[in-house]
Image (cartoon, rainbow, N blue to C red):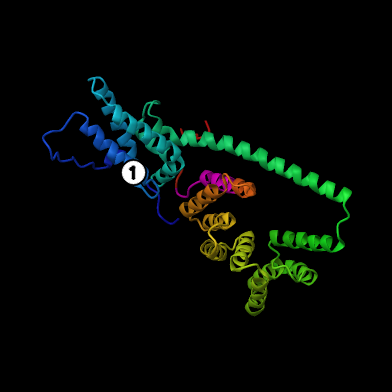
Amino acid sequence: MNTPYRYFQIRDIDYMPRTVTSDAMTPADRLRELLTEAEIVVSNLKGAGEKAVRLLQLLDEIESEQTKLSRTGIDLRPEEGRIVGLCSSLRRQKATFVCELRRGGGLAALRAQRQPAEEAWWWFLDRDLAMERKKAARRYGLIALGVAILVVVGVVIFRRFFSPDSLVVEIYSNQTTGMDEIMRGNYAAAIPYFEQNLILAPDEAEWPIRLGVLQQIAGDAGRSQVLFDLGRELSANDANFYLQRAQVYSEINSHENALQDAEKVTRLDPSLPMAFLLLGRSHAGLGHNREAIAAYETVLEMTEDSKGNETIYVLAKIDMMQLYQAPQPGYSPPAEEDAGE
């Protein structure tokens, strides 16, 4: 993001006095006004910007008004129900809330200005979020380790009790060597291995798609287009073709191309969580953090309770946590900040 970061100064925000339009104001009317304004902000947290800062003061004022009115014996049960709902909604959206405050330097910087009491939990949601992410990272780390162990055990069993087809072994070997060359940035050196796989498995769409991307990087647009046409023909449908190509672009950090293909897939078949995962990674690679987080949240919504998508769910969780934990350009947190404490 090229938008310059700056600190929101809570004391500088001009809160205009409200005009009382009725002479029949009750002592609880002020509390209801504050609640209504806060509920509107919480319902529209994404993109709230400075309104997220305003929400901090609203919650301070709501607590003050509630405490003051409780001492008078006024029946506040309806208002207290709204407060419970408001707080519950904010806690569920604390990741979005903390993200909105980052453009102003972060919740820690605002907290340093205000020095709130520990009881004002909304001023410490960044710490709560950091603790949750640490626990999640440990949990998903254990899941990833378990998956890795299962893969190793599966490979050992396969090699021990089954006799793999020589063609499959050769294709796998070519793929592994080609991917190793790509990881080292030797794109031209990877081409022969995938060309060999195209000969060995001419009915698989993966090989012409991978070759098309490599030829595109090499500057051979004509050959690249021929391979892409073949890959599309061999793919089950256009969504599958663009999904595979977006995956290849993502592997070589060609984020613009990956983004274009991922967006096409989400339009062609919005039921594919992998498309939104690639969309998130492309946005993250381009520095579009807000869009990346939105894409990852979509993946989590699509895969949280669905069987068969557990791996995609874990990947989206890890990617999103890494994005949140990445240092924001142009901002150094105050010395007292330690989200992990």
Residue 62 screen position, x and y as percent: 29, 31
Q: Quadrant of residue 100?
A: top left
Identified at 57% across, 57% down, the residue is 272
Q: Nearer the viewer, residue 95 or 312?
A: 312
Q: Main secondary structure of the magenta part?
A: helix
Q: Specify whether 50 is left or right of 202.
A: left
Q: Which residues are magenta?
A: 316-330
Quarter where residue 195 is shown: bottom right
Q: In the visual, does 307 lie left or right of 46?
A: right
Decide if residue 9 is in sight here.
no
Q: Residue furthest left?
A: 23
Query: Does the magenta run of residues contain 323?
Result: yes
Q: Amino acid at mark 1?
A: Val
Q: Which residue is mark 1?
A: 41
Q: Position of residue 303 (x, y in %)?
A: 57, 48
Say above or below: 302 vs 223. Answer: above
Single out the residue that lies furthest toward the bottom.
222
The x, y position of residue 262, in whole percent, is 55, 62
Other residues around mark 1 within 10 Å, as few (<14) / some (14–19) / many (≥20): some
**Picture residue at 27% right of the left edge, 41% below the top:** 12
Drawn side of residue 269 relative to residue 194, left or right: left
